[in-house]
Image: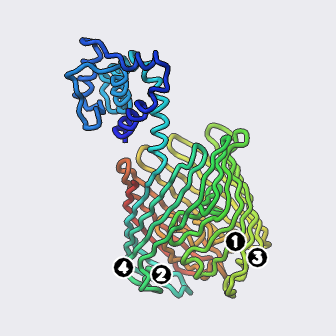
């Protein structure tokens, strides 16, 4: 892209050069004197692969060139400064000082061209996962034991409309195969094993240090106990509305207004659109301690076809939570979040754990306990229904008992290792139980991830 930028720069400069004062034109197009030290310097940088050249990848060192041409070559070398040896970096800096005036004028045009060239971007994430499940929870109609594979592709497209506004869109798909009774997709709808969707879209506007996002988007408040969705294309709900993120003083602030949508499969279990109004605040109270608080007003809409198993989902529910992260030693942190709703009973939830983060490795061990009326189970990765959706989109816990009769608790383990800039592997394990019920649901997943 930098080669293209320099070529475009040359064209833009030539087209606009006659708008400059005559003295500037003469200076820029005057030849660099034969024998000037910069010729040898450019040749040295060219041999090191740090010179962009004249569009065809060559450098014509057999003739005198103008100060303008020399400045273009120096600008190209500056773009590759990170690849230069210490000796060549010093040489580039010396050339930059010699042609500072020309580079200053070129810099204005370079910034404008770069802005136009880089406004459109595509990136994404591919994940291949192997999972093993051993679920023997009592009174669970979906007991299962076996293995499953899945592949998931997510593609993000952004387009910079102007300096403040960016449009975004995400699409992707998932396929899974293995033991049928472990894949709700393959077991209940064999003809729809492959799933694809456009699941995020909207615009982001930056103004005075605040970012406003309008559209269908992911949302996590606090550490995610009250709401954490949008991570998965098939199993996650999303927020359709507006969020505002910025600072009030030293406090990171998020304001939310909108509705959570129905994912393709969660709607099968009674999920309905729910209204969310809320605010989240996080800040450091000391160098080692971060404290946060979240409040949301939540009301689910009545489903078009009421399901008696999910009547509680239509009730109004105000929820609040507090969270903290404490660094207790180098690379070691304690994490915790506590939440309550305005129900009179079974209205509390918590997640507490420890994290180790050093170099390429991140390890998190946590304990979660969620009472059935404490949170919206369709929109939290800490519920039994969505506990794995951030990585897998699977669940095999006793969700019937959790949603309607009993409470849920689990030990969770996560380990991520970054292999290089684009590739990492991770391991997720959960040992889940339902109160007053025997047996447990043990699930293990190994994922290989590629970000592009």
Residue 31 badge: none
Q: Which mark is residue 315?
A: 3
Question: How many numbered markers are drawn?
Answer: 4
User: Is there a contact, CB below 8 Å, between mark 1 and mark 4?
Assistant: no
As displayed, is residue 191 above or below residue 313?
A: below
Q: Earlier in the sequence, mark 3 or mark 1?
A: 1
Regarding mark 4 in the picture, which secondary structure is present there?
strand
| Residue located at (49% from left, 37% from top) | 112
Of mark 2 and mark 4, the one earlier in the sequence is: 4
Which residue occupies 37% across, 78% down?
Answer: 177
Q: Earlier in the sequence, mark 2 or mark 3?
A: 2
> Alpha carbon of mark 1 to alpha carbon of mark 4: how far?
34 Å
Where residue 390 appears, as percent x and y from the top left, is 51, 64
Which secondary structure, mark 2?
A: helix
The label on residue 274 is 1
SS state under label 3: loop
85 relative position to 176: left or right: left
For image coordinates 59% across by 61% down, the residue present is 217
Closest to the camera, between mark 1 and mark 2, is: 1
Q: Which residue is mark 4?
A: 178
Question: How crowded is the residue under tag 2: few (<14 C-alpha within 10 Å), some, or many (20+)?
Answer: some
How far across and how far down the image is residue 450, in percent? 38, 57
Residue 325 appears left or right of 363? right
Q: Could one spot residue 291 in this view of the protein? A: no
Q: What residue is disc 2 on?
A: 184
Side of 100 relative to 376 (left or right): left
Residue nearest the viewer, comparing 79 with 401: 79
At mark 1, the secondary structure is strand
């Amino acid at each position: 892209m930098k080669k293209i930028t320099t070529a475009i720069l040359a064209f833009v400069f030539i087209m606009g050069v006659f708008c400059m004062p005559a003295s500037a034109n003469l200076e820029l197009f005057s030849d660099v004197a034969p024998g000037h030290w910069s010729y040898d310097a450019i040749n040295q940088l060219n041999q090191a692969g740090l010179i962009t050249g004249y569009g065809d990848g060559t450098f014509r060192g057999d003739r005198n060139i103008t100060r303008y041409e020399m400045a273009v070559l120096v600008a190209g070398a500056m773009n590759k400064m990170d690849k230069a040896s210490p000796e060549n970096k010093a040489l580039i800096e010396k050339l930059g000082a010699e042609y500072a005036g020309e580079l200053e004028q070129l810099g204005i045009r370079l910034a404008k061209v770069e802005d136009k060239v880089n406004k459109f971007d595509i990136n994404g994430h591919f994940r291949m996962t192997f999972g093993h499940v051993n679920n023997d929870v009592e009174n669970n109609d979906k007991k299962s034991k076996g293995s499953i594979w899945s592949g998931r592709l997510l593609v993000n497209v952004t387009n910079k409309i102007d300096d403040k506004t960016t449009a975004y869109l995400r699409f992707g798909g998932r396929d899974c195969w293995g033991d049928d009774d472990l894949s709700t997709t393959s077991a209940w709808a064999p003809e729809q094993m492959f799933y694809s969707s456009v699941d995020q879209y909207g615009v982001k506007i930056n103004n005075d240090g605040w970012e406003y996002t309008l559209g269908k988007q992911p949302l996590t408040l606090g550490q995610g106990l009250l709401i954490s969705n949008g991570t998965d294309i098939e199993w996650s709900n999303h927020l359709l509305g507006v969020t505002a993120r910025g600072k009030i003083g030293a406090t990171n602030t998020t304001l939310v207004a909108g509705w959570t949508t129905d994912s393709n499969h969660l709607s099968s279990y009674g999920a309905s659109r729910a209204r969310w109004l809320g605010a989240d605040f996080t800040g450091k109270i000391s160098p080692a301690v971060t404290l946060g608080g979240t409040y949301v007003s939540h009301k689910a809409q009545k489903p078009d076809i009421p399901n008696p198993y999910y009547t509680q989902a239509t009730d109004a529910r105000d929820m609040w939570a507090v969270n903290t992260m404490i660094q207790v030693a180098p690379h070691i942190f304690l994490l915790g979040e506590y939440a309550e709703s305005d129900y009179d009973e079974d209205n509390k939830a918590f997640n507490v754990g420890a994290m180790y983060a050093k170099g390429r490795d991140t390890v998190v061990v946590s304990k979660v306990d969620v009472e059935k009326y404490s949170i919206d189970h369709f929109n939290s990765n800490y519920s039994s229904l969505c506990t794995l959706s951030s990585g897998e989109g699977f669940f095999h816990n006793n969700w019937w008992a959790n949603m309607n009769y009993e409470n849920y608790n689990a030990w969770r383990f996560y380990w991520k290792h970054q292999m290089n800039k684009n590739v990492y592997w991770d391991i997720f394990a959960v040992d889940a139980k339902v109160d007053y019920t025997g047996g447990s649901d043990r699930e293990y997943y190994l994922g290989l991830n590629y970000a592009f």
